[in-house]
Image: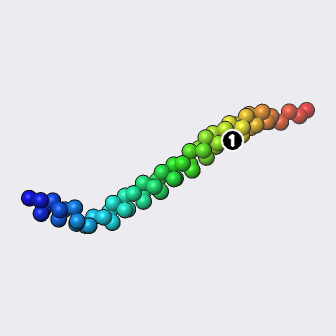
Amino acid sequence: MFTGFFDFLRDETGAVTVDWVVLSAAVIGMGMAVLTPVAFSTDSASQGVADYVGSVPVGYEGE
């Protein structure tokens, strides 16, 4: 019984898969960390643009 257990512990099959899962999680986590501040700053920038566009007079007010 213990022989099968120790064979299982020494088996390295699937180790590359674990490495890829960890690396993928790290890339996704870093992407989220970078994009979160960008998302919040674009919200305030778009509000500033909307305020400016709303204040610009539109149309012809001539004679």
Report the quarter where the N terminus lies.
bottom left
Q: Is residue 30 above or below residue 58?
A: below
Tell me: 10 left or right of 60.
left
Q: Is residue 7 above or below residue 46?
A: below
Q: How is the image coloured?
A: rainbow
Task: Name the residue: 61% across, 46% down.
Answer: 38
Residue 46 visible in the shown view: no
Res 13 quadrant in image: bottom left
In the foreground, 57 or 5: 5
Q: Which residue is mark 1?
A: 45
Tell me: 6 left or right of 49.
left
Residue 4 in the image: x percent, y percent? 12, 62
Residue 62 visible in the shown view: yes
In the foreground, 21 or 45: 21
Mark 1 Cα within 10 Å, few/some/many (few <14, many 20+)? few
Residue 3 in the image: x percent, y percent? 12, 63
Report the amino acid beneath label 1. Ala
In the foreground, 51 or 19: 19
Res 25 quadrant in image: bottom left
Tell me: 56 left or right of 47.
right
Task: Name the residue: 17% across, 62% down.
Answer: 6
Tell me: 27 left or right of 52.
left
Report the quarter where the C terminus lies.
top right
Residue 62 in the image: x percent, y percent? 89, 34
Task: Name the residue: 60% across, 44% down.
Answer: 37
Q: Regarding mark 1 in the picture, which secondary structure is present there?
A: helix
In the foreground, 12 or 22: 12
Q: Residue furthest left?
A: 1
